[in-house]
């Protein structure tokens, strides 16, 4: 099924796909409803051509497994990993807010900059998340503004561990 064809569909007999949140070279992320637990979630689906690559699927599963082990207020939480119609997906917590990249772009468009206090807070949040991950042998390898969400409280949430390296491993 084409990635945009998922909107309005039920994935895995459970997750009701609502809207496309973002798309990258490896996967698409959707906002979805989980009627079983009555909550909004984010669902990351591997692009179909990559679903046929066993090595890529193995790495995608490793991302889900590695991140699912982490419980930290500034690391995105994984709820589920599964496949449907040969499409592999990870279900994450949905963070209501904007990416740090989008926030910085909006500020720039208005001729403003992020305040020192706000930048320091987000920096501390992400440093705390990275320290936590590193203590568990996980190296993110793709920290950038697009991979940091800011919730409506201004908290930084680190996400997209897609190219995570497990210390001593080859992910």
Image (cartoon, rainbow, N blue to C red):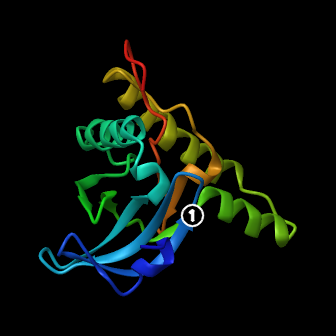
Q: Position of residue 26 (x, y in %)?
A: 53, 51
Compared to residue 24, the image places residue 161 above or below, namely: above
Q: Residue at x 40, y 74 (%)?
A: 31
Foreground pick, 67 / 52: 52
Under circle 1, the secondary element is strand
Count the labels in the image: 1
Compared to residue 33, the image places residue 89 above or below, namely: above
Q: Position of residue 136 (x, y in %)?
A: 31, 24
Q: Position of residue 82 (x, y in %)?
A: 23, 56
Q: Residue at x 56, y 48 (%)?
A: 122
Query: Which residue appears farthest toward the bottom when viewing the image?
Result: 8
Foreground pick, 170 / 3: 3
The C terminus lies in quadrant: top left
Would residue 154 be seen by someone viewing this image from the given angle?
no
The N terminus lies in quadrant: bottom left
Foreground pick, 72 / 20: 20
Q: Residue at x 40, y 49 (%)?
A: 52
Displayed quadrant of residue 90: bottom left
Foreground pick, 120 / 99: 99
Compared to residue 139, the image places residue 91 above or below, namely: below
Mark 1 neighbour class, 10 Å CA radius: few under 14, some 14 to 19, many 20 or more: some
Would residue 95 be seen by someone viewing this image from the given angle?
yes
Compared to residue 84, the image places residue 66 above or below, namely: above
Q: Is residue 36 left or right of residue 153?
A: left
Residue occupied by mark 1: 23
Q: Position of residue 4 (x, y in %)?
A: 50, 78
Displayed quadrant of residue 24: bottom right
Q: Residue at x 40, y 47 (%)?
A: 74
Q: Is residue 123 left or right of residue 53?
A: right
């Amino acid at each position: 099924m084409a990635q945009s064809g998922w909107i309005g569909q039920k994935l895995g007999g459970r997750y009701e796909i609502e809207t496309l949140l973002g798309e990258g070279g490896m996967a698409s992320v959707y906002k979805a409803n989980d009627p079983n637990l009555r909550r909004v979630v984010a669902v990351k689906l591997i692009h179909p051509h990559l679903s046929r690559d066993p090595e890529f699927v193995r790495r995608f599963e490793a991302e889900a497994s590695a991140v699912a082990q982490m419980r930290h207020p500034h690391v995105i939480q994984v709820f589920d990993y599964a496949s449907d119609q040969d499409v592999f997906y990870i279900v994450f917590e949905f963070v209501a807010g904007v990416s740090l990249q989008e926030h910085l772009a909006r500020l720039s468009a208005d001729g403003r900059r992020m305040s020192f206090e706000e930048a320091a807070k987000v920096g501390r949040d992400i440093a705390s998340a990275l320290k936590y991950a590193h203590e568990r042998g996980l190296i993110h390898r793709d920290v950038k503004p697009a991979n940091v969400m800011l919730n409506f409280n201004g908290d930084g949430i680190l996400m997209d561990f897609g190219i995570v390296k497990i210390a001593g491993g080859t992910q």
